[in-house]
Each structure stands twice: as structure tokens, then as C-alpha cells.
Image (tube, rainbow, N blue to C red):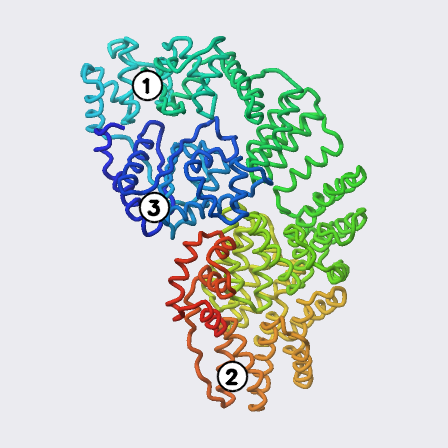
Amino acid sequence: MVDTELASRDAELRNLKDHVARLTGGGGGLVVRGDPGIGKSSLLWAAIDLSEAAGYRTLQASGFESEARIPFAGLDQLLRPVLFAAEQLPTAQRKALLSALGVEDGPPPELFKVALAVLNMLAELAMAAPVVVAVDDIHWFDQSTQEALAFVARRAERDAVLIVGTIRNGHTSPFGAAGLPEFEVLALDGAASRRLVATRAPGLSPVDRDRILLEARGNPLALVELPEAWQASGVTSEHGPLPSMPLTARLERAFAGRVADLPGLARDAALIAAVDYGNDLSEVLAAASVLAGWTVTLDVFAAAIEARLLTVSGTHVGFRHPLVRSAILQEEPLTRRLAANAALAEVLTDDPYRRTMHRAQSILGPDDEMADELEASHTISLKRGSVTSAIWALERSAQLTTDSAKKGRRLLLAGEHAFGLGRTDTLDRLLTAAARTELSELDRVRMEWLREIFSDGVPGDTPRVLELCAMADRSAATGDVDLALNLLLGAALRCWWADTGPEARARVAAVTEALPVPTTDPRYLAALSVAEPVLRGAAVHDLLSGMSPEGVFDAEALRLLGMAAHAIGDPPRAIDLLSRSAQLLREEGRLGLLSHVLTIQINNHLWMGDWGRALMVSEEGHRIAGDTGQPLWTTGSMSQDTIRRGLLGETERALKMAAEVEAAAGRDRLNDLLCCVQLARGLAWLASGEYELSYQALRRLYDPADPAYHLRESFDGVMFFAAAAAHSGHREDAAPVIAELERVARITPAPLLHVHLLFAHAVLAADEDAEELYEAALGHDLSRWPLVRAKTELEYGEWLRRRRRLAESRTPLRSAQNTFDLMGATTWADRARAELRASGERVVERRASTVDELSPQQLEIARLAAEGLSNKEIGERLYLSPRTVGSHLYRIFPKLNVTTRAQLAARLEER
């Protein structure tokens, strides 16, 4: 961009200067959008100049369309100059990063572990001087790099790290969808456009200048390039109107005209540079020599450089603008592009991976040998952490394959990886192609599983569940038990999210039980419990009780076992299993599954009375579900947070959120989430003393004809339903519901249901039976059920006080008040205090704890610091940089009036 144009970009330059100036106080990300040639790159260079003038470290890279399939190629460009800083990373992060970049061998890198390594490495560098990462055309970076940079940008608010990326309008990008600040670079106005043309093409006639201004429409690149192309063509405005075409096409045609004028060898070299993502000078010269048939030297680039098409800097070849690359590729015929890829493949003897990729792009017809090589290379892509490259390799392999069944199998394998990425569009295209091949019976079943898994178990139609069971039967018969279990878990999830009726649930359970697998297999237990949480509850409970999960160290196994415990209504066991799974998933960087675990954990922490932990898990689960693009789990975490707010008595907010969840769940007939919605409403009204409204809302949970009916999910509301019935005068109406639940309790040992029924029996009992039932309930071991114990004590204390047994009422009321205070259940704690006053006891009002002023994230950081974890360890656990953790603790300590971590632990215990 020339100075004339920069002078016309005051607003954009001010925006960049503000971001750079604020960097010492914390960074983040910035998206610069605009059309091709509009000046995004020039503004990016201005940001680099501003940063370097301020003494900041700058890391620069450009995305190329041909690089999009190369795993972590963008990170490799960016981080090579500072890779020495990786030595300061924790061992697991350093190995993940260096493995992803191909510097060291290692297991397939987990994306989010690599992203955390990048965050910590940049944050460490920023301790010496702020870091500005400038990426041109970030939408052409590989998917892994884009997601890693988006991850860093969202979490660098406390670190002096700024990531600026330009994105061409019309392109989607994970970085552009990360919710970062952004601005769009618009066309120059008329006056600025005239100044630019006058500076660059002073010899134009007024008529031609006006025509250029009309055609360029304020696009700086067009204002610079079109005059030269116009004059070289010999066409003037006197020849009449030019054919209409998009501006980008006009620019490409202008560049292509220069390509056509290049000498033969220069054109060969330019074509090799266009198909080679490496941009290595010696590599391009070697391949150009192969293409030309004799040795070419550096002089070959002179004509292209003079034509302002290419640049040569040190050992790298580059293009003056991305449109030059696309213009070259469009100008050259297919035979020449094939030959260029073949030439590159010939010289890449030391890089078998890239050699295979270029060979695959040098072939037109079927080639089974090449197809086999490509299929084998996809495992290298996975090892390097690039699933998109693996998908491309498998799909291209299928295109080159002559055997129809093998072609279909390769497409399905690509589809499995597309599912892992969450790419419904790619999966649908691959399955459509696979359906046209002669698939084996087993592969047809696998195709149906792939069609199923994107539904995530919804909606729950019975015929589809029965069909999945039949497929599982066939898979097991052919020896593929793993596929059978996958199909059955998918069928079970359909039964859970949206009730499919007894026939479908029974069929899933029967097929699962018939599989030749150990009954302790976590997949077996998950499928059985999720499909039939009540009728198979006792069997699963016994199996889980007979296991020693302490010896299980696999995150996925712990997740499935925790899911099974949750499904049968065993929150204490679920918490133990899921907490260990969450820790391992964090260490492994598997955030997609972590969001599932956290969402289930919210529910269990709520019923176990750990509302502080539920709040922290809710905030993290919702954020990660959004980060990883999982709308069902985002809604799921929101439904649990709605219940939490209902418990807290935040009536207005809970009701508003309930309506939002209901709208999302109602579209897919998710009666599991609709049940949560009604529970949240009932809890909100119960906490605010609106007992009639609460009863009517909760009554719907136990009506099989209601859309919100979900038998297992309704266990969560039994205690509250009974309390609402007792306080609203609906004991008689509630009696048959409780009787039915007692029948269910004789079938399943679900601890959640049984402890809730202890409360319900007491609170709904006749006066002559109530005291014995209250005492019986409180006589049970409720050490892990503080919410149930406190609610029982509150109701028992009220019952005693109403019978003027004032002295006796105070003990359970005091205990209830203390427990509710510790839980943060302010509304119910206040109710216990009011009852104590009514009993004649003088009550000291609880002063609000300063701990309550902490955000969920700050509270979690404080808890981990109090447990003795270092800033680095806390950062690894929460996906934050150590500096961000330190910044939070810097604010937490004065808030809580503490100066040491030991004092911090004591203050948290006071809460």
C-alpha cells in the first residue's frame, strides 16, 4: 500500500494503534476483513511497523490455499523463529507442540494441548516484550493452526500477546468465528482513489482515468494494477464498454496477462512456485529444472520479479499478492499443472509425505498403487494432528481406486474422521459418494452408523432405534463387536434424549446383553444403563459396585462408567468417576469430550449440594461446548445452569433461561431437556414461596402423557415435588405419584430416588406418622447428601415449631441454616433463620462472604491455588497461561484480604 492510500486509512490505522498501544495491559485477537486487494495486507504491515517501532516482538506468516491440508503448517511458519522458547514448556506440552510441528516423533498431537503450548510459549515470550502475531489470509491456514490461534486469542486477555489476522470476505474461518473484535476495510472514497491513480499512472487521459476509477470501485490493488493492464492491452474507453466481470476476475486477468508474457523458463519457475506450498528457493529451482529439462538458476526469476509477480527474499520465493498465485494456476492448462506437481514430487525425495501429496496431484486416471500410498499417508497426517489432511488423502485415494468396495471403504474411513471434526457437510458428501459404491455388508452397517452419530441420539423415533439394533446384531455376527457397541450406544442415546417407549429400550438392552463382551466393558455398561436406567439399574449398580475403578486410568472408560452411574441415579459414584475422567481429558487436551463430562457433572454436583463446584463446572462446560462447536451440549449445560439458578431462588433469570432452553429442546422433541426445564421452573417458584405454581410445574414431570416426562430425569425432582405438594395443599393429588415412584424404587436401587423418597414420605405423612418418618430419614447416612439432609432438617424443624415444640425445633433448624449457608443457598438459609426467630432464638444475620464476590473462574483458581497447585499447574488444568492465573490471583488476594495461599485455603473454608 503506498503512502497515498495509508493517508486515507485514518480510522483503520487508529484502530490498529489502539490495539497495539493497549497490548502492555493485555492482548487478545483482532480480525481484519475485506475484499481481495482492498488493503488488508498493507494495514497488517502497518501494524507490524507500529509494533516493531514500539520494541515489540513480531511473528509473521501468510496463508496459502495449497497449504490448507498440511497439518500445523501455519504454526510452523509462525513459531520457527522462536521455537527455542518451547524448552520452557511443561514436558507434555513441549512434546505435543514439537510433535505437531514435525520436530520430534510422538503420538498424534491433541489440538487443544498444542494450543495450550502455543499460549504458554507466547505468554512466556511476552514477559520480555509484548508479542504481535500477524497473519495474512489466515483463512488459508490449515484448520488446526486456525483453531489453535483462535484458542490463544480468546485466552490472552491477561497476556501481552495480540494476534491479528486478515480474512477475505466470503471465506469462513475458525479464527473469524471466534468472537474476536474485528473491523472491515472498505473501499477508498473518490478523492483518495483519484490521488492514488494520479500518483501511480499520471499519463492516463481523463477519459481513461475515469473509466479506471469506475472499474476499480475504490479497490486499491485495482487502482494500481488496472492502469498498467489497460495501457498494455491497447484498449481505451473509445472502444466501447468492456464485458462485465467481477473485480477479482479482472485483477486475475491483469496478472495472468503478465504471466503469459513471461519467457518459458520464467513461466516454468512461476508455475512451480504456485503449486509448491513450501516456498523454498532451492526446492523451486530444482523442480523447475525437472520441468524444463535442464538446470535453471536464480536468474530465472528476474522477469517475474520485474513484472511484479514474484518476490525472492533470502531462501524463500513469494508472490506479491495471493491473486497472482491463483492467476498463474488459472492461466496454465491442466497438463502443465500436472507436470509441475510431478516435477515437485521427483525432487522431494527427503520428504515422502509431501512427495506422495504432489504425486497424487499429478495423476488423472485410476492408479491403485498411488491410492494405496495415499491411504497409508493419511496416518502420517493424523500423527501430525491434521485430520483435514487425512480426509483429503483418503478421499483422493478413493478417487484413484479401481475396486468399488475398497473405494467405498476409504470414503467411509474419511467420513469417520469428518465426524471427529464435526463437519456435517463433509460427512454428508462422503457418505453420498460411498453409497454409490459396492459396499460390503459390514461397510453398509458402518455407513448407517456414520449417518446416525451426527444426530447425537435425537430425535428418538422407535423404528430407527430398532433398525440400529438390527445393524448391531449383524455387526456382531460378522465379528465387529466394536461397531456393534457404537451402534448400540447411539441407539441408547436416542432412548435417553427423547423417549422411544419400552419396546425400543428393551431391544437395545437385549442386544447389548447378547454381545460376547465382558459385562465390565465400559461401553457395555453405558449402553445398557442409558437405554434402560430403571429396569437394568440394579444390574448396572451391582456391576459398578463390583469393579475397582481406582485401577482405571483411561479417560474414555471413566467417562462411560461415570455416564452409567449418572444414568442409573448414583450421583456420588458418578462424581468420583467423572472427576477423574475430566482431569485426564484436560491433560490430554480432549476438550470435545470434556464438555460432555462437565455437563453431566453439573447435575450431580447440584444434587450433592456442592453448588460452588456446580457453578464453576457450568461456566467451564458451557464455554468449552461453545469453543468446540457442540450446540446440543451447550443447551445441555445451559439447562443445568437454569436448574442451579432455580435452586438459588433467582426466579426471573431462571424462568427466562428456561424459556430459551425449552425453545431449543422443543424443536427436536428432547423430553430429557424439557424435563429439566420444568424442574427449573418448579424450583424457582418453590424457592420464592410460589408453592401452587411450583406444584403445577413439577406435577408435569410425573405425567407420562406430558412432553416433559422422562422417568429417570424425574428422580431429580421428587423431593421438591413433595415439598411443593405439602405447602400447596396437594397431598392427596401427590399420593399416587409417590406410590408409583415407590414401585419404581422396588425395581432399581438408584440412590438418588431412594434418598428423595425418604424426604417425600416424611413431608407428606399424616401428623401421627411424620415424626417417626423424619427421624428415620435423618437416621440414614446422608453424609454425601447435604442438600437432602438440610431440606429434611428444615421441614422437620418447621413441623416441630408449628406444634409449639420450640426447643426441639431449634437443633434441626440450626443445622439446616448452617448447611444452606455453606452451600450458598441463601433463600433457604434465610427461611431457616426466620423459623429460628419464630422459635424464640436470637439469630445473627450471616454477613456476605467476600468469596461470593469472585467470578466462577476466579473461584476455581482460588480453590486450586489453595490446594497447593502452582500457577503453571493451574494454567494446565484450566487452559490458561500462568501469567493469566497470576493476574487473577493478584486480584483475588486483596479481595479476600489474604496474602498467602495458606490464608487463602482458610478463607475458602469459612465460606
Q: Position of residue 833 (x, y in %)?
A: 49, 81
Q: Position of residue 406 (x, y in %)?
A: 70, 26
Assign a secondary structure to mark 1: loop
For the point 74% across and 64% down, the residue is 748
Quadrant of the image occupied by residue 538: bottom right
Identity, as a three-letter code, of the amino acid under mark 3: Pro
Mark linked to residue 425 = none
Q: Which residue is mark 1?
A: 308
Identity, as a three-letter code, of the amino acid under mark 1: Arg
Q: Which residue is mark 3?
A: 130
Q: Which residue is mark 2?
A: 835
Label 1–label 2 contact, CB within 8 A: no
Q: Is residue 749 above or below residue 273?
A: below
Q: Is residue 345 above or below residue 453?
A: above
Q: CA distance from mark 3 to mark 2?
A: 58 Å
Assign a secondary structure to mark 3: loop
**Number of numbered markers:** 3
Q: CA distance from mark 3 to mark 1?
A: 34 Å
